[in-house]
Image (tube, rainbow, N blue to C red):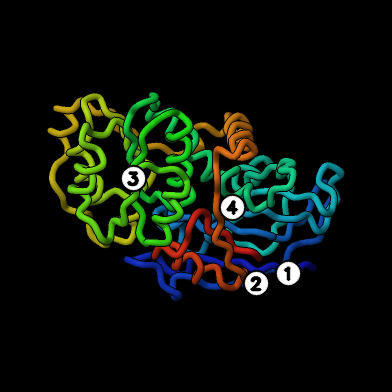
Amino acid sequence: MVKSKKWILATKFEGEPKDSNFKLEEEELPELKDGEFICDAVYLSVDPYMRAHSFPVGSCVIGEQVAKVSESKNKDYPVGCLVQMYSGWRSRTLVDPSKPEDLEAVRFLKVPDLGNLKSSLALGILGMPGMTAYFGFLEICQPKAGETVLVNGAAGAVGSVVGQIAKIKGCKVIGFAGSKEKCDWVKSLGFDHVFNYKEVNINESLKEAAPDGIDCYFDNVGGDFTSTALQHMNLFGRISICGGISVYNATKPPIGPSPYMTILSKQLKIEGFIVYRWWKRFLEGKAEMKKWIDEGKIKYRETVEEGFDNMPKIFMSLLKGANIGKMIVKA
């Protein structure tokens, strides 16, 4: 029997995640049958959405990983083959491609040939976060050359890419991040204005950077930041709601000014999204992103931490802003 470890949700999140929310368990995987294979985690992803997503107590913590096939009775997935899959925080996973109900839960595919690039990028710039930036920005905001774009969470795996895509499209870009190191990196990506939201007045900073208003706003933060940003939107502005990390740990609903009259008077388009609505177009987005990387138009950064046993600690540090670019756990 092959043993595997998995992190389960031991207690429901209330406020900030804590150690007691997680429990490490060991399980035995059954012997392989024809057509099955076992994958060992190589890189695992931690993402802010994991805090906001509702999943049952006692179940494996959700998430994606890049894994290497270690045992196989499937000729299409030989030993050494790399796959990426949503199998959660597991050290090993048994996959049976003949069971579509299991595949829906695991949802896996082979890691494409990335050339000289690391396979961990399949979890970042060439994976879900990159596709979130690509489709969530281009499809919803539909930026036009010369327009002004606002991005918060600009040093994160998604926000940093949104701003660079906006520059490729000929836009003026304003970014907000949470430390000098993060702001310096965001500036190096070509953003026109970058502010540390912890040190500035957001309203005054937007007056300074966008005296003629904002046309497109890509929101990763929500809360008070968005209440302020709405006041600076131009007529017919477009807002893509990707996340609300400022309120994920809130124990009570946030209270702020009603946005409805602002939305009405400015005739704003505001749309939330889950990136998997464009799942069937991911190959298109990945090809374009890879081309931009090869051309030097898109830069990326990873924050890599080590140790499967450290998954909760690394996840909690992510929610406190410890990452620049994509946070990856090396198993």
Which residue is label 1 attached to? 3
Q: Residues within 10 Å of mark 2 (few under 14, many from 20)?
A: few
Of the image marks 1 and 2, the number of the one nearer the N terminus:
1
Task: Name the secondary structure under disc 3.
Answer: strand
Task: Name the secondary structure under disc 2.
Answer: strand
**Dot 1 and dot 2 residues touching (CB under 8 Å):** yes
Q: Which mark is residue 193?
A: 3
Q: Which mark is residue 58?
A: none
Amino acid tagged 2: Glu
Residue lying at the far bottom in this picture: please name it: 20
Which residue is label 4 attached to? 64
**Gap in Å between the C-alphas at discs 2 and 4?**
19 Å
Closer to the eye: label 3 or 4: 3
* Residue at point 31%, 57% (across, down): 196
| Residue 178 vs residue 82, the one in the foreground | 178
Of the image marks 4 and 1, the number of the one nearer the N terminus:
1
